[in-house]
Image (spheres, rainbow, N blue to C red):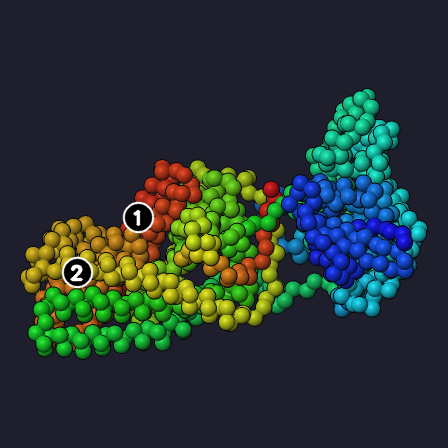
Amino acid sequence: MSTATIALLGQPNSGKSTLFNALTGLKQHVGNWPGKTVEKKEGSFARNGVTYDVADLPGSYSMSANSDEEVITRDFITSGKADVVCILADSSQLERSLFMLADYAGIDAPCFLVLNMEDVAKDQGKTVDVALLEKKLGIPVMMFSATDTKAYDQFYFTLERALKEKSHINVSELEKEYEKIIGYNEIKEQIKGGNISGYTPMWLTVKYLENDKVVSAKLKESLPADAASKIESIGLDANGAIATGECKFKWIDELLEGAVNKTKTGVKLGKLDRIYTHRFWGKPAVVLTVILGLLGSFIPALPIMAVASIFDVLKNVIGDALVSVGCPAFVTGLVCDVVIQSFSYIVKMLGFVFGVTLVFGMLEEVGVMARISYVFDNTMGKLGLQGKSVMPFLVSFGCTMGGAAGARVIDNWGQKVLTIALAWAVPCGAAWAIIPMLSTVFFGAGAPLIIVVLLLVMILHMWITAKIFGRTLVKTEDRCGMIMELPPYHKPKWGALFRYVFGRTKDTFFRVVKVVLIVCLIFYILSYGSGVNDTSILYKVGTAIEPVTKIFGLPWQLFIAFVASSVGKEGAVGVISALYAGGSYGEGFMAAMSGAARAANLNELLLANVSRPEALAFIFAITFNLPCVVALAATYQEIHSVKWTAKIAIYYTVGALILACLAYHVGLMIW
Amino acid sequence: MKKLLELLKDGNSRTPEELARELETTRDDVLRQMDFLEHAGVIRKVPFMNESNGCSTCASCSGCEGGCAAECKGCVPQNAKMNMGTMWEVV
């Protein structure tokens, strides 16, 4: 009984494994290639009195020496261990997958070509003229579908034919292309003399031109000294691989010319993409999408807001009950103003976390977010940033820490610092929880408008920040364009989306509860002036600094809340909750606290004590304040510069106060 | 492929379709050129946060204590598939 060895060669996803399994069945064993962590699969089958050993070579893109897989593949084939090499290509995308064949051409081992995935090609309306390809290539070629058991007879037949014919690829047309490359002929002339088995001089020359280290070393060893020094003296193009690659593609195109018939499938852009990728309308369309998305996120948020009002009722009922049983005022306040009031706020905030996460999660799933980042990419360029910065920005909508960490993909230090500095301006998840909530409290139906204005100011803020810091950090020449493949639109997977949204809301809930309760408690105690409000330390300090804070349009309570928001934006809510609901604000409030007039809820109290311009100032101040201390730490961790971290932090604190001041004065003009 | 790289030098980002239009070729041709350039190490895919293990990328969850499954709050959840397409940059 005679034996023959077949090697299966193909790019990943060419269907090699399916073929291997179908051929060998259970007769296979898996190990490692000596000294490498690459999996070695071998098997065998018998047919017509011949035992065939099959080696499933590791999937690799080409025959270059870029990876262990490729080196193993190449060495195995050229060592002469295989009697025939079965080259697999994906017939649904021959232009791409025949590259392996083109790179193989010139290796001195018999081969045949299997065009796998015939079914997929058929579905695409492609037909391949196998006979013409055979004629051009000089090796057996067959259409195949590795998943179709009936196709294997043809496979065995072609295999036997290839073994008998010992067919080699006709490379004359390919070599004509190579000959156009400067230096090709000279190098080949020198290499001809050397004798390296398994390779033709053409193949060696091409790999030498491609700067293939393994081949270069081999040539140096085997060539006579004068030939080696001669080829070394021929200057190599650093982009040699690109030049030879172009030859290979050209050869593939000529090969397929007339051999592949496809019902023309020109890429047509969908209606939506025609708008998004439009030179002029792209940007307005994207801005409109974002605004609609934000407005849309109010819809799922509103029912949850309504649920939160239960807490207000609960607060009154429990408060009354506690007072009636003679509970001390401190405890009553603690239960009602710290715990219940905080929960009322937290639930309202969660409504927005839920809404925003849901709407933008959906936009992302559907594929719209990718278009948004694409449209803004060129704007990034004008800010001196890489297109990659889009991702840290998007992540920053969730959490600035994540954004700072995400900036790690940017290699250029200056661009990284600038990206993080700008990402700080993007309102994070905590801001998205607090701001809409406060806006609704103060401005009711006008809240969406406030959000839109904030978003526009954010863009302006980023632009100004980029101008201020950009000059010293980046040069626009540093930027190189990118290729962005937009994902196809698809329906959101609702299950996964809701799991994600609920998970996110739950995470936010636990984080926020902790911060808000602790901050609220601390400030409640600090401001609790044993019944007489103006004896509390906080009140004294607060009223003392108020003349200054008023410049920014912030009453002292709100200013302290602003300071607390530097620790974490959720903290601001805790402070407001404690200071306005707590036992130390104003005569009217004390009266309300004393029991009978408890009906007044915090929202009304806030409205009574904080004017709209002040509220606007506060909303601006916390939105554009530094995100939180953890983000500060994350920023330092990424940019490793105390100077720049401090610079950015101070810039944001000052900037937030300036914006608050502006908002306040604009507010005064309106109301 | 030289032309493709030349085009990217102007700093603008393009989709494969746009490249195909400017290079007067097909999208498939652009895709195979990208394939080639990627394997040759001339361009590379930009990793997304949740693709690079989700763990080491976030400052708040240092190291892999508790396994990489312990995702960090605020970051992209590990299993969330971002339908953000793919970006390639010139190395």
Query: Where, quadrant-wise, is the N terminus of chain A in this rendering?
Result: bottom right
Task: Pick whichever, A7 or A539, lies toward us.
Answer: A7
User: Is disc 1 placed on a helix, strand or loop?
Assistant: helix
Q: Is residue A173 visible?
A: no
Kind of residue at disc 1:
Thr
The image position of residue A635, as x and y in percent, is 39, 45
* Residue occupying the point 58% across, 44% down: A480
The image position of residue A542, as x and y in percent, is 15, 53
Chain to which the residue tagged by mark 1 belongs: A
User: Is disc 2 placed on a helix, strand or loop?
Assistant: helix
| Residue furthest right in the image | A165
Q: Indicate which disc residue A607 carries.
A: none
Few, some or many residues within 10 Å of mark 2 (<14, 14–19, 20+): many
Q: Is residue A43 left or right of residue A642?
A: right
Tell me where residue A280 sits by quadrant: bottom right
Q: Indicate which disc residue A653 carries.
A: 1
User: Against B56, is A270 above or below?
Assistant: below
Query: Where, quadrant-wise, is the C terminus of chain A in this rendering?
Result: bottom left
Question: Label 2: which residue?
Answer: A524
* Residue occupying the point 14% across, 77% down: A321
Q: Is residue A429 left or right of residue A185?
A: left
Kind of residue at disc 2:
Tyr
User: Against B23, is A336 above or below?
Assistant: below
* Residue occupying the point 46% across, 68% down: A499
Task: Pick whichever, A455 or A661, lies toward us.
Answer: A455
The image position of residue A632, as x and y in percent, is 35, 47
